[in-house]
Amino acid sequence: MLSKHLATSNRVFDFICQWILPLGLLLLLCALFFLPGRSQHHKLFYGLFSIPALIALCLRPSTLKELIREPIFIALLLFAGWALISVSWAPETEGIARPIKTALHTVFLFVGCYLLVRHRSDLLHPLLFCAATVAVIATLYNLYVFAQVYGPGMRLIGGGAFDNPLLASHLYGFFCVYWLSLSMLWKNRHIFWLTVPAALVMFTAVVATGSRTPLVALVAAAIWVGVLCWNRRSIVLFGLLAVGGSVVGVLFSGMLLARGNSYRFDIWQIVLTRIAEHPWVGHGYGADLVVDPGIGRMLAEPHNFALGVLYYVGIVGFLPWIFFQAWGLLSSWRYRVQPLLVIASTWLIYGMAAGLTEGGGILSRPKEHWFLLWIPLALIAALSINYRARRLLVTPVQRLTPQALDSLTTGAQVIESDGLGPKVLRLEGGDFLKLFRARRWYTSGGFNPYSERFAVHSQQLRNLGIPSPTILHVYHLKDGSSAVHYVPLPGVTLRQALQATSTPVERHALVERFGKFMAQLHERGVYFRSLHLGNVLVLENGEFGLIDVADLHLYPSSLRIALRQRNLRHLQRYKEDHGWLFEQHLEALLDGYAMVASKPAADNLQKRILSGSSPAQA
């Protein structure tokens, strides 16, 4: 009974991490473009991200171990905790329930992002791309509609849940930053030439809103990403910044300057006077803020994030607030080899710059301001944790010219090839070079090149104590293909070892050990799609290791029965392997598997084998 309950909780946890959280993040990012209002956006976030993250945390509390060691998350808890304490001296607040729920939803944004990156990091890049594509399509439509009705002084708002040109400009700028970052990072030329017009569409929308804040923020973001990615494109980017600034200044100066300073200086002066009343502890989270800059109406925001924090929670709350932003940028700089951290940190720079003249609330339900701070920060925290745990790519991808490739492979021995040429080469020094053909940009191999998968999976397996190749370099080639340079494991394939055994007793013992190793893979959540005896090495110390690990997936929990059976069917495809494992030494395979796997898993494996399945010809 306990075993069945554990299996059910594992399946629920896996389903949340593998499917619910990715869908929730996708809709959080792009649903404002097509939903009729913010309330629906809130409900989607609660139902598909925040609450599922809470359930996952309840099912597996050990998830918190890594999170509570992350400085960004610690500072967030301190900030949220102090904000909730400050409610006690905010006289206008009606109760504590709503502030607690708001703070918890912000915290669970971080928890959900951490779980998603840890268990489905391969989906993060396609998710961001999909959300940005939705944004481009929706923005094109918004611009088309706006052009039909445009008149002097009109400002673009857009459709969906947008109701304010400044708030809409935050999202247009957010996705402009994404396409800009992608143009600096992506090595696939097809994607590069897609990012340029996409960035221009989003930039046009920002200009059409008539908002100056995101324009300044975009400049700051462009400078940051240009420096962070420093390459030839950075020089082009800085040149375009100069030209673009001149064009915007000439063509749109009237629209941008006609509104004066929007009374920002008057507002800030009034808010600073209020802050001076309670500089250390603030007026309390939820306290009313009414600013009269003399324009005939009252304002409820200081139009500056930092001033808002100081007003509500004082210097005590301001310290963790400024710390988690500074630490996020520092972490992104230190780990800038990871492309997703470059994108997230550029978003944070954009948000910090936009926050200089916009906003003022400290904790809120999901809305446009989340795109300026909480979403970038949650991604940075999640990526930083998993980067340090070596679950993400930590090896920089280098460009390898045809001349450098020829030099590297001089005197190399071809180990494996196909109709297009060599696939695996043994270099003169004994290292291996594995080549991966170029994939179409819209496939999973386009978003996550197999060379990078190979490098990440090798490290993830070693984290689990499973021997795998040591990665030296990851390369991107001029023709769009990629390669990985690695130190091979010392040993022979299990197929070769079985062929070399002299007695049935030795072969029986070897198959039994393999059964135990296969059970270890399954119990640790390793689904190796290419599992066959040619991809399992018998090492010099007698242990087993894996090679050719690009086609592999790590699940949060032990594999469910269906995946174990699918792995088994792959093994049964090879005639010689089938004879050794499922005919001559089946008992040894099952005995070894049962030493590690749960009894239901071992019984199901035996039932599957005995049900009969003829092998394909290898």
Image (cartoon, rainbow, N blue to C red):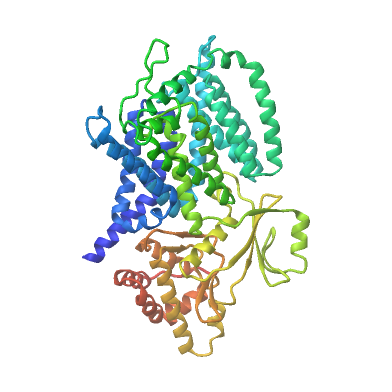
Along the viewing direction, whichever of 468 and 233 lies nearer the viewer: 233
**Is residue 503 visible in the rendered structure shown here?**
yes
Residue 84 located left or right of residue 309:
left
Residue 357 in the figure: left or right of residue 226: left
In the image, is residue 293 above or below residue 289?
above
- In the displayed structure, 208 sits above or below 533; it is above
Q: What's the residue at 53%, 42% (across, down)?
A: 345
Q: Quadrant of residue 309?
A: top left
The residue shown at (64%, 19%) is 249
At 58% from the left edge and 73% from the top edge, which residue is drawn? 489
Instruction: Work out which quarter of the rendered image holds the C terminus and state it.
Output: bottom right
Residue 222 quadrant: top right
Instruction: List x then y, in percent, for residue 320.
Output: 42, 43
Q: Position of residue 355 (x, y in %)?
A: 48, 30
Q: Count how many numbered circles sit on residues in the image.
A: 0
Dividing the image into 4 quarters, which one contains the N terminus? bottom left
Q: Is residue 414 above or below residue 504?
A: above
Q: Is residue 384 above or below residue 193?
A: below
269 or 223, nearer to the observer: 269
Residue closest to the eye, 171 or 478: 171
Residue 442's x, y, as percent?
A: 56, 44
Residue 48 in sight = no
Q: Position of residue 236 (x, y in %)?
A: 70, 36
